[in-house]
Amino acid sequence: MESSLKHTALLDLEAIRRDFPLLSRKVNNKPLVYLDNGATTQKPTAVIDALTHYYSYQNSNIHRGVHRISQDITVAYEKARETVQQHLHAAYPHEIIFTKGTTDSICLVAHSFGKKYITAGDEILVTEMEHHSNILPWQQFCEDNGAVLKVVPVTEEGTLDLKALETLLTKKTKLFALTHVSNTLGTINPVKEIITLAHSKGIPVLVDGAQAVPHLAVNVQELDADFYVFSGHKSFGPTGVGILYGKEKWLQQMPPYQVGGGTIKRVTFAKTEYADLPLRFEAGTPNIEGGIGLAVALDYMNNIGMDRIAEYENELLVYATKQLSVIPGLRIIGQAKNKASVFSFVIDGMHPNDIGTLLDQQGVAVRTGHHCTQPLMDRYGIPGTVRASFAFYNTKAEIDILETATRKAVKMLA
Ligand code: PLP
């Protein structure tokens, strides 16, 4: 495949692909074509080396040691926080909370912000295109506290119904939680305009950036997001680490979520005084190497350039749409004009899992099923889709292989 890599003026794909060892693997005796980046991304050698280096030479606990390696790794961990801050263009490092991932970040906000600001009869607004991780924490909060979950519908083409949104943002709405990019449809929501609208009614907004950070430049201050969350593993970093960005004005007022070592200033049996931001929200020994590895991953993306990544991935999406949409019986799910590099489809009379299994036999890794968006599947009346999700290391040659493999699968299943 190496020789058939088509160069784009935008990226040096051969050099980039050499940075990702897993991409040179074979699967089922075929060169791997990895198109499941929405589920998780592969890691560049720089990230893998950072993890190995940490365990070989830097392993120590942070924040509490007076000895050299503990102090050095504390500095490295806090530097990683600053890298995340700069990547998101947050105002302060203490607005960056290290978590386990997107799900964990949303649970933190649901429990902590929810406890402080949302009571029985209040409304929490989500959208029909949310990942379960941005539904269940709110649904559970509503069940426990008597609040009401409201849902913004999705149009047939896969965009948010903005007219409905206007009427759903009411005096009762205490938080609007929505995804920046849909993991199933690829839709890029106009979050800046939506946040402006919500703020005009005094409603804070949480943005799920799990599928945006790997593809787009994000500026939380420009967006004016109140909370912005994402996962390390979907952004070329390690698993088990993620980020909650929160505006200082909210985080300062929010009670701790999980408590324990690391979150305190002073403990007595009578009373505990909690630490300042960000440690108040980081209970226990964190994923130290994960935080450091995530910063390396963000640096890696920035070295390529987020705008170039977005432009190149759009080229891939346009190419995939052109090549695959002509396959007889294929229907694209998610036809918004503004899309990230997610290509979801169904084929008349065929189950997505059967197509996915036949693609795997040809070395092509895609995701099939409901993608943790069952309400969205219900909206379209389908059990699931086949989803090819591209990253900056994918190539048009790989899309050609996907097309050929899909045609073959269709033939076999017909
Ligand atoms: N939100 C979106 C849009 C996602 O795509 C995902 C994962 O696919 C999540 C949240 C959950 O991410 P994690 O499992 O890393 O917590």
Image (spheres, helix red, strand yellow):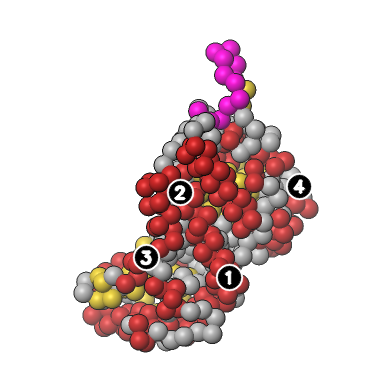
Q: Earlier in the sequence, mark 1 or mark 2?
A: 2
The residue wearing badge 3 is 367
User: Which is nearer the eye, 356 or 402?
Assistant: 402
Identity of the amino acid at label 2? Gly
From the viewer's perspective, is 159 left or right of 383? Answer: right
Q: Give me the disc on residue 290.
A: 2
- Residue linked to disc 1: 305
Residue type for callout 3 = Arg
| Alpha carbon separation for disc pair 4 and 1 | 35 Å
- In the rendered structure, does residue 264 fall within the stretch colored magenta? yes
Q: Nearer the viewer, residue 272 or 334?
A: 272
340 up-or-down from 203: above or below: below
The amino acid beneath tag 4 is: Gly
Q: Specify whether residue 256 is in view.
A: yes
Asked if labels 3 and 4 touch by Cβ distance under 8 angstroms, the answer is no
The amino acid marked with disc number 1 is: Gly
- 370 shown above or below 90: below
Write the start and end of the magenta stretch as one range. Answer: 261-272
Dot placed on the residue nearer the N-terminal end, 3 or 2: 2
| Residue 266 image-quadrant placement | top right
Badge 4 or badge 1: first in the primary sequence: 4
